[in-house]
Image (cartoon, grey):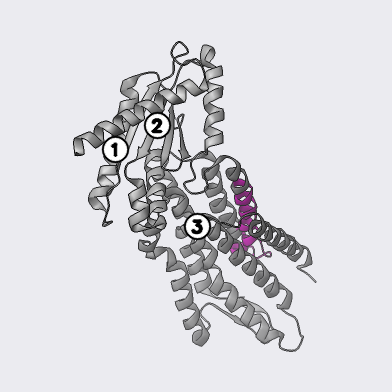
Amino acid sequence: MKWFGLIEVNIFLVLIILMIIVMTYLTQKNRSFSTELFLVFSWSTLVVLILDSVTWIVNGSDCVFCRELNYLSNFLLFLLQPVPITIWLLYVDFTLNKSKERLKKCWFYYLPFIVTLAVLIVSIFTDCMFYIDENNIYQRESLVYFLTIFYIFPILYPYVLAFRHKNCLDKKILTIIVSFGLFPLVGMILQIFFYSGPVAWPGVAITIVYVYLFLQTQKETRDYLTGLLNRQQIDDIVQLKMKDYPKNGGFALVMIDVDNFKKINDVYGHSQGDEALVQIATILFSSIRSRDYASRFGGDEFLLLLDTVHPEDVEKIISRFQAKIDAVNSKSKRPYKISLSPGYTIYSPEIHSDFISLFNDVDRKMYKVKKERKDKLE
């Protein structure tokens, strides 16, 4: 068993991924869309790892039907290899943009699978991709190299997405994107030039482990729907900021309420309401700086913690996300418009004696803005 040691690595990774999948199903009954994508990504990688191991086991074996099994396992391996790549593209895009509608327009994410399928169909009749010789030995042909080079572009595309979101990208997400691109590319290069065993897909499996650990930590600090910080986390951060005021100075809080959100839910359904909240969260997160915080405070209310004591800085950020909301409304085909009422306060220990008084102050100012907007409409 020449490749036994390398196949053992695959088997070990299959068991780890299977354990991650089971734990995800058991611990997350109401799974988010990103978690569902992660599960599909994990399942597809698991199947590819198994097929990868089978190809090495049967290659050169003289058992009955081994030559047919060798061909079939390699065919399926090539066919399924682009699936995890496509799912990963969808996962990264949704993680950064929080939009299912956008994914429907990204048809080019499916090109790796479409191109691979076309090449495999041609290879059935011409052996232009691979063939199994009379000794049951797998032989690569030129189109294998073509596909490998072709896969580089979709594997690297998440870097393009990350660059577009560089001003508001979570460092943990950036690490995941970098690792997914790095490990498979190194493995592909080694397997092409040295053909030394199954090394490409173990790199992807390592990424799955990292993503799972990331998702587990996110559950404790992030809002389930929007991915922003949850109420508990922002409360803790604000209290810490208040405690550190003598050393680090003040900060600003912006409370934001979604106008007529109940009407959106009642008239157009909760799925439309959820979609609106996710889009608002994405806009708010993209409007703040890396040293600021965005959270879903509860229901249809959001809270921004801004590292500034200057009203003009706060108003600039408010103007920024209001402009983005207006741009979304002008392009959207939805039967409703998104409208936000923001109010803000600058923390001062002379004015805000404690945590509750600070939140009462920003809450009061937000409702003042909301009432003024309502009065104007009437």
Answer few, some or many: residues within 10 Å of disc 1's Cα (few below 14, many 20 plus, some between 14 and 19): many
Check disc 2 and report its element: helix, strand or loop.
strand
> Is 2 rendered above or below residue 347?
below
The tag earlier along the polypeptide, 3 or 1, is: 3
Separation of residues labelled 3 and 2 (CA atoms): 27 Å
Compared to 223, does 126 lie above or below? below
Q: Majority secondary structure of the magenta segment?
A: helix
> Which residue sits at x=37%, y=53%?
265
Magenta span: 190-214
Q: Nearer the viewer, residue 20 or 77?
A: 20
Label 3 belongs to which residue? 33
**At label 3, which amino acid type do we have?**
Phe
Residue at the image position 24 percent from the left and 52 percent from the top: 331
The three-letter amino acid code for the residue at tag 2 is: Met
Q: Nearer the viewer, mark 3 or mark 2?
A: 2
Residue 104 shows up from this direction: yes
**Which mark is first along the chain, 2 or 3?**
3
Give how far across and how far down residue 108 sits, in percent.
39, 64
Kindly indicate the quadrant of the structure image that contains residue 130: bottom right
Residue 306: quadrant of the picture: top left
Mark seen at residue 322? 1
C-alpha distance separating marks 3 and 1: 27 Å
Q: Nearer the viewer, residue 166 or 187?
A: 166
Residue 187 or residue 46, whichever sits in front? 46
Where is residue 64? Give x, y as percent.
75, 89
Q: Residue furthest right?
A: 1
